[in-house]
Image: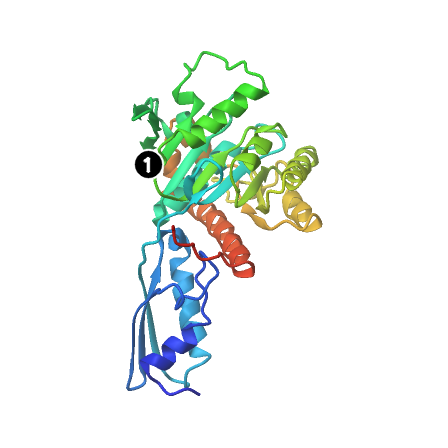
Amino acid sequence: MPDLSSDSVRNLLADFKDPETGRSVTQLEQLHDVQAADGKVAVKLGLTSWAAILRDEVTQHCRDFLAERLPAGTDIQVEAVEHDRPAEPIGQIGLRAKNVIAVGSGKGGVGKSTVSTSIALALSKAGSKVGLMDADVYGPSVPHLLGTDDRPTAIDKRLQPVEKDGLRVMSMGFLVPKEEAVVWRGPMLHGAITQFLKDTDWGDLDYLVIDMPPGTGDIALTLSQLLPLTGAVVVCTPQEVALLDAVKAIAMFRKVKIPLLGIVENMSYFLCPDNNKRYDIFGTGGARAKAEELSVPFLGELPINIGIRQRGDDGQTAGNLTDQETAQGFEQIARQMVRNIARQHEQAPAMPSLPVL
């Protein structure tokens, strides 16, 4: 066993990985303070806002990591502190976002926009900097779900996203009257999505969540050409007819080389408030089984819930993350998704930024 000293603890932590980058926390100067004396170790571990939703488990993992390597009985304290690391520009449009996540579905009506919005809200609630882009040009529902009809303003020819419930939001629903239909061909769609990404002043983001249109249209191809997507989440319901379409969505993402972060089974069951009995209205477990069959991570299941529906209708979707009955499900899905991203980073650590000459 190594001597109990600050230097020896730092040397041990050279093998502890930052979840955001997959690189050593000592390499990235994330050990803000290390004290070791008299059988006690105290570490201040710097974590960025990207890792906010994993903060507690990363600090516990760090404690366990040290406990396995230090003398038995050592008193180990690990405190997470803020560590600033701005996003680097990515893609041909120079978007400053650490991760871009597409949320799609094979068909409409499965709750994709509700899941997209609630995942973004869960990440923001944890402390991350989050943007939400409604790419469902034909049926933009994010403005209604968030209860805002604000219009984005322009500063120096750049659109300013609407800020609502801690999110930076952009949607065609802000630009087109509710009663008007968008009747566009593919090139116009490509132009709109490009403008939303390139000409919107998103600022510095940890996550940009993109609510995709249903089906397997060409917006996924547009996105894959514009910037490197971290991955995709596919939302479906348990019944076989919905799973058939979800399989097509998975095939689409794979064809355009967008990694799959996981599947969410929405409307998985109904828990009757009168007798607390569970009813599998659309069947159950279909998405989990299909995920296993296709070697795609399963992120979790969400129930048919009157509160979720009502809050969506009332423009109060943010309440999904404050209602004890629903918050846990959405938070667990967002957390598992970020864990899967961190696992990707661990397997392929990010390269350090090169100095500008």
Q: Residue at x 53, y 42 (%)?
A: 229
Vertical placement of residue 89 versus 1, above or below: above
Residue 260, given in percent of the width and then of the height, sits at: 60, 46
Residue 283, given in percent of the width and then of the height, sits at: 65, 40
Q: How is the image coloured?
A: rainbow
Q: Depth check: 61 or 239 in front?
A: 61
Q: Depth check: 268 or 295 in front?
A: 295
Q: Amino acid at mark 1?
A: Asp
Residue 70 picture quarter: bottom left
Residue 346, given in percent of the width and then of the height, sits at: 52, 60
Q: Which residue is mark 1?
A: 165
For the question of whether residue 310 can be seen, the reply is: no
Q: Residue at x 55, y 28 (%)?
A: 213
Q: Residue at x 41, y 25 (%)?
A: 144
Q: Depth check: 25 or 277 in front?
A: 25
For the question of whether residue 288 can be seen, the reply is: yes
Left or right: 114 as drawn, with respect to 263: left
Mark 1 element type? loop
Q: Residue at x 44, y 48 (%)?
A: 331
Vertical placement of residue 135 versus 62, above or below: above
Q: Quadrant of the N terminus?
A: bottom left
| Mark 1 crowdedness (10 Å alpha carbons): few <14, some 14-19, many ≥20 | some
